[in-house]
Amino acid sequence: MQDFRNLKVWEKAHSLTLDVYKASKSFPRDEMYGMTSHMRRASVSIGANIAEGACRRGDADFARFLQIAVGSASELEYHLLLARDLELLKASDYQRLSDEAVEVKRMLASLTQKLRADN
């Protein structure tokens, strides 16, 4: 069991969540329960699953939560793409956030591989 706040991937995921909240703040009010909500929930889920998995007893359990976090990051990638295509998100903001999401996915994959190699 470890403190999730000490994990670099959690720090990066948390930063991504804060950036998603900032970027979605300017979305139209009628998207509050649509795109805004979906993007925010997907981004929050990444860090939340890292945190929950870190407190589990075994590496296999932790790796399972990391896989769920990868799924949430992929979901966020789609929401970002859709927000860009609907012109809710500027292309530059899309690219920055998408790059952050991809980096988090890479970090999650790397940590998952390390956990599995340790077993």
Image (cartoon, rainbow, N blue to C red):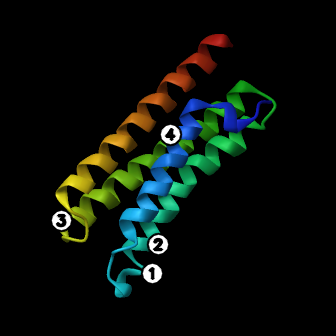
Between residues 44 and 67, which one lies in front from this camera angle? Answer: 44
Q: Earlier in the sequence, mark 3 or mark 4?
A: 4
Q: Secondary structure at mark 4?
A: helix
Q: Residue at x 69, y 28 (%)?
A: 60
Q: Is residue 114 left or right of residue 87?
A: right
Amino acid residing under circle 2: Ser
> Which-is-in-front pick, marks 2 and 4?
4
Q: Earlier in the sequence, mark 1 or mark 3?
A: 1
> CB of mark 1 within 8 Å of CB of mark 2?
yes
User: Disc 1 to disc 3, how far (Cα)?
Assistant: 18 Å
| Mark 1 residue crowding within 10 angstroms, few (<14) / some (14–19) / many (20+) | few
Q: Is residue 73 left or right of residue 47?
A: left
Residue 72's place in the image compared with 113, above or below, is below
User: Disc 4 to disc 1, how far (Cα)?
Assistant: 26 Å
Between residues 84 and 118, which one lies in front from this camera angle? Answer: 84
For residue 61, which quarter of the picture?
top right
Residue that carries the numbered disc 4 in the rendered image: 12
Residue 95's place in the image compared with 79, above or below, is above
> CB of mark 3 within 8 Å of CB of mark 4?
no
| Mark 2 residue crowding within 10 angstroms, few (<14) / some (14–19) / many (20+) | few
> Which-is-in-front pick, marks 4 and 1?
4
Q: Is residue 6 left or right of residue 80?
A: right
Q: Residue at x 55, y 44 (%)?
A: 68
Between residues 116 and 99, which one lies in front from this camera angle? Answer: 99
Residue that carries the numbered disc 3 in the rendered image: 85
User: Disc 3 to disc 4, how far (Cα)?
Assistant: 25 Å
Residue that carries the numbered disc 1 in the rendered image: 33
User: Disc 2 to disc 4, how far (Cα)?
Assistant: 20 Å
Residue 102's place in the image compared with 48, above or below, is above
